[in-house]
Each structure stands twice: as structure tokens, then as C-alpha cells.
Image (cartoon, rainbow, N blue to C red):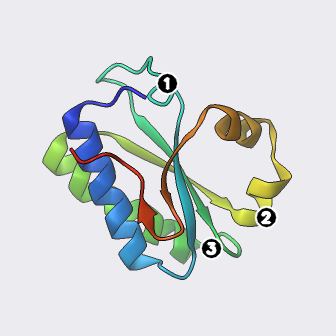
Amino acid sequence: MRLTRRERKALREYVSALAERIPNRLESVVLFGSKARGRGRSTRDTDVAVVVKGGRTPRLRMLVTEPTFEPIARFGVDLSPLLISSSAFRKGSPLIQRIKREGIPVWSRGRNLLPAA
């Protein structure tokens, strides 16, 4: 994982907001894509899988997407969340298998796993 200081700050802020907004639904947050592989440039988006208990609803999508606005504005980091139900994460489509293989957990079971910015 090769994140800039601004990317780490933005991601920490986003994960903290998620933990406050959906504490009973949030299972894990996983960085994936080029940033997780250490190949992302600063102009690329920061892909994060947000794994939640239960089904995906329009309200839940809003609760997961809205917290990206502030870190994007403050740090200029394009956060791109992908909402995944825990049952879909267990089943593992080809994309989810790749996230499991290459992704880096940044939040799990109430713990922020990102190093301090």
C-alpha cells in the first residue's frame, strides 16, 4: 500500500464517519485497486469496499456515500466506495475474490487499522 499523507487522512476521516453513521451494520472497510497494489497515482481514485450486514438499500447507499464529500473537499482525494453485503462478500464474485486477494483491511470490528497520517 502506497498512500500519500492526504490519502491516509481522507481515508481515516471517511472510515471514522462510517463507524459513527452505521455502527451496527459496518463489518469492514477494505482498500482495493491500484492504491492497494501500490501502483496508484495521486490522480487515481481511492477504491474502498464497504462490507455491511444485511441488504443494500438506497438509504444505506446514501449513508455510505455522503461521508466521502467532506474528505474529498478537504484533502482533494477522490474516495470511491463500493457497498457490499456481507453475504455477497462471503459468496465471492470475481471482483470480490480479487478484493479479498489484493485488498488491505483499513477498518474491522470497531478498529481503525490505518497508520496515523
For the residue labelled by badge 3, is the local secondary structure a helix, a strand or a loop? Answer: loop
Q: Sequence order check: which comes first, mark 2 or mark 1?
A: 1
Q: Sequence order check: which comes first, mark 1 or mark 3?
A: 1
Contact between labelled residues 2 and 3, with CB atoms less than 8 Å apart: no
Q: Residue at x 49, y 24 (%)?
A: 34
On residue 112, the disc is none
Q: Residues within 10 Å of mark 3 (few under 14, many from 20)?
A: few
Q: Quadrant of the C terminus?
A: top left
- Image spot of residue 16 (x, y percent): 33, 65
Q: Quadrant of the N terminus?
A: top left
Residue 56 relative to residue 65: left or right? right
Residue 39's place in the image compared with 103, above or below, is above
Q: Amino acid at mark 1?
A: Ser
Residue 17 relative to residue 85: left or right? left
| Quarter assignment of residue 65 | bottom left
Q: Which residue is mark 3?
A: 57
Task: Give the camera-side residue of 105 and 52.
Answer: 105
In whole angstroms, how far apart are the C-alphas of marks 3 and 2?
A: 14 Å
In whole angstroms, how far apart are the C-alphas of marks 2 and 1?
A: 25 Å
Q: Residue at x 42, y 53 (%)?
A: 113
For the residue labelled by badge 2, is the local secondary structure a helix, a strand or a loop? Answer: helix
Mark 3, mark 2: which one is toward the viewer? 2
Residue 84's place in the image compared with 102, above or below, is below
- Image spot of residue 43 (x, y percent): 30, 23
Q: Amino acid at mark 2?
A: Ser
Q: Amino acid at mark 3?
A: Thr
- Image spot of residue 45 (x, y percent): 39, 33
User: Which residue ends up furthest to the bottom in the rendered image?
Assistant: 24
Q: Which residue is mark 2?
A: 87
Q: Which residue is mark 1?
A: 34
In whole angstroms, how far apart are the C-alphas of marks 1 and 3?
A: 28 Å
